[in-house]
Image: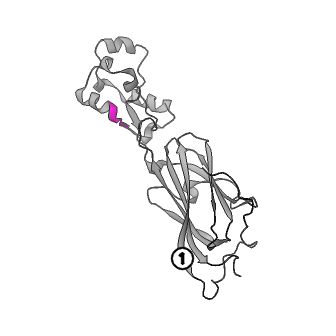
């Protein structure tokens, strides 16, 4: 992530007002600024991205939205295995089969990685063939059994806190971090973007920083987008 402030960035106009109207002859184009974050699935982990408004002209933000792409790669999904009783060695030696794994043992495995059983689970691809064959647990490699399942969480379960500020002045656009559900909705398409209470205009070379603190245990890529338009050829915000 880019985390460096730009020393010569200009702040938006002191009143925070959008331009009353583009100057005569000025051309406006739709434009979005995208912030990207690689979430690790580690609660309390903090990351940030900084975007500098280009020299093309004033940018007016009218709404904010986000999306989350879940990382489906093995090893990044917090795979877990069933938590079997202390006498597991004896049980396995007597030929306990995959089909004998209980929901309680799976729930204990989910709890071990900090995920509620209510979120559900699914069988990992590497373990699926053992389920189909219903083999003895004793015949399954320990590393495979310990990664037999994956949390059933989807992109809509992504949970994070975010703040937005102008790095050149330290001016913040909220009094404390906002939870994504409160500010932006959830990533299943419900309330996919939030209109700003008033459009905000940023002059060229203004640096905008968004900081994110992870809450959920889902790894993946988070995109936050400031949606709006540019007024081309303007170096200052017209009154």
What is the quadrant of the C terminus in the image? bottom right
Q: Is residue 41 magenta?
A: no
Residue at image x 23%, y 27%?
A: 133
Picture layout, residue 169 above or below residue 83: below
Return the residue found at the far left.
133
Viewer-proximal residue among 101 and 166: 166
Residue at image x 40%, y 40%?
A: 120
Residue at image x 54%, y 76%?
A: 29
Residue at image x 40%, y 41%?
A: 152
Q: How is the image coloured?
A: one colour
Q: Is residue 94 left or right of residue 205?
A: left
Picture layout, residue 179 above or below residue 235: above
Residue corresponding to mark 1: 29
User: Circle 1: is it few (<14), some (14-19), or many (20+) Cα within 10 Å?
Assistant: few
Residue 158: x %, y % from top left:
50, 48
Residue 190: x %, y % from top left:
46, 60
Return the residue found at the far bottom.
24
Residue 179: x %, y % from top left:
59, 53
Viewer-proximal residue among 70 and 80: 70
Q: Is residue 124 magenta?
A: yes
Which stretch is magenta? 122-126
Residue 46: x %, y % from top left:
63, 45
The quarter of the displayed image where residue 6 is located? bottom right
In this rendering, the count of numbered labels is 1
Viewer-proximal residue among 88 and 212: 212
Q: Judging from the image, what secondary structure is the residue with disc 1 in?
A: strand
């Amino acid at each position: 992530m880019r985390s460096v402030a730009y020393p010569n960035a200009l702040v938006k106009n002191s009143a925070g007002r959008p331009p009353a109207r583009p100057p005569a002859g000025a051309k406006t184009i739709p434009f979005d600024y995208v912030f990207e974050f690689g979430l690790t699935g580690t609660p309390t982990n903090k990351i940030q991205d900084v975007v500098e408004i280009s020299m093309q002209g004033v940018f007016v933000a009218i709404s904010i939205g986000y999306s989350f792409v879940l990382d489906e790669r093995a090893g990044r999904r917090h795979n877990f295995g069933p938590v079997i009783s202390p006498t597991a060695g004896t049980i396995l030696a007597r030929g306990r089969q995959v089909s004998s794994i209980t929901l309680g043992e799976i729930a204990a495995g989910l709890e071990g990685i900090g995920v509620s059983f209510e979120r559900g689970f699914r069988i990992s691809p590497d373990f699926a063939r053992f389920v189909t064959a219903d083999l003895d647990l004793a015949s399954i490699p320990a590393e495979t059994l310990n990664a037999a399942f994956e949390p059933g969480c989807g992109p809509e379960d992504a949970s994070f806190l975010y703040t937005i500020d102008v790095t050149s002045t330290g001016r913040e656009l909220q009094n404390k971090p906002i939870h994504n559900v409160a500010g932006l909705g959830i990533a299943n398409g419900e309330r996919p973007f939030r209109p700003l209470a008033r459009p905000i205009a940023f002059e060229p070379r203004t640096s905008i920083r968004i900081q994110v603190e992870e809450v959920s245990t889902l790894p993946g890529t988070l995109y936050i987008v400031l949606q709006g338009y540019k007024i081309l050829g303007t170096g200052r915000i017209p009154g």
